[in-house]
Image (spheres, rainbow, N blue to C red):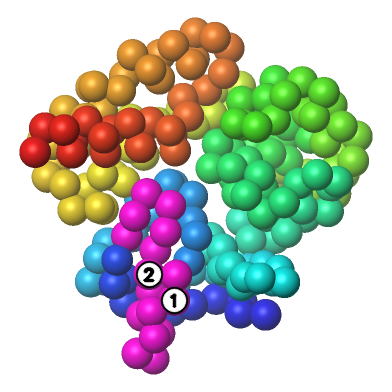
Amino acid sequence: MIAFVNGEVAALTPTLAVIEVGGVGMAVHCTPNTIAGLRIGEQARLATSLVVREDSLTLYGFADDDERQVFELLQTASGVGPRVAQAMLGVHSPDALRAAFASGDAKALTAVPGIGPKGAQRLLLELKGKLGAPTAVVGAQRAVASAPAPWTEQLTAALIGLGYASREAEEAVVTVTPQAEAAIAAGGSAPVPQLLRAALQSLNRAR
């Protein structure tokens, strides 16, 4: 298993980072939150989990070891593969997920694309207690209900990390704000991965 990669960031996309390690470019699949913390040309260390399939080897990257551990624990539930586990971490922090499972908050899980009410209830049954207790108990329930709260900052940072100017990033965020507000009004949370794709499309049309 590749536990981590450490090297210069060679390239970034909304969901992928290429880290140069010993002259080799390692393609690492990451959440938009993790991508937002990276900058091309700068050194980065990502905790990683290697998913082996018959026809592929896929490396998933995380900001720290805690995220990686939660990523792997989530996959112990039936029907949860690496993409769903990564989507869950793209919407909620590890502590927010712990709080959701500890309190039986199905609504927090249905905020993740691809997880419906029945799937959320099944996950609550299968994973309750497996992730451990949240490290920040105070305010954890509130964090789950509103996560990810700073979606505009996450989206702006991700766009800047991809090479766009601050003004371009801010204008793109304004463009996708109605989409985010509609998702929140429907009882969910701002879907950062989808918003990032929509923002990139608006920027490409403007150029």
Residue at position x 31%, y 46% in the image: 158
Instruction: Answer whether labels 2 and 1 touch (C-beta < 8 Å).
Output: yes
Q: What number is the disc on residue 18?
A: 2
Query: Mark 1 — residue?
Result: 26
Q: Is residue 160 above or below residue 11?
A: above
Q: Position of residue 92 (x, y in %)?
A: 58, 38
**For residue 197, which quarter of the picture?**
top left
**For residue 167, which quarter of the picture?**
top left
Residue 64 within the segment the image draws in magenta: no
Q: Nearer the viewer, residue 101 or 87?
A: 87
Q: Position of residue 82 (x, y in %)?
A: 67, 54
Among all residues in the image, which is located at the extreme top?
185
Side (left or right) of 2 relative to 173: right
Residue at position x 91%, y 34% in the image: 125
Residue at position x 38%, y 74% in the image: 19
Q: Position of residue 129 (x, y in %)?
A: 87, 44
Residue at position x 25%, y 65% in the image: 40
Q: What number is the disc on residue 34?
A: none
**Residue 12 in view:** yes
Amino acid type assigned to the residue bearing label 1 in the image: Met
Q: Is residue 183 above or below residue 153?
A: above
Q: Residues within 10 Å of mark 2 (few under 14, many from 20)?
A: some
Among all residues in the image, which is located at the extreme bottom?
22
In primary-sequence order, the first of circles 2 and 1 is 2
Q: Residues within 10 Å of mark 1 (few under 14, many from 20)?
A: some
Amino acid type assigned to the residue bearing label 2 in the image: Val
Give the SS element for disc 2.
strand
**Residue 104 in view:** no
- Residue range of the region highlighted in magenta in the rendering: 12-27
Quarter of the rendering occupied by the C terminus = top left
Side (left or right) of 153 relative to 45: left
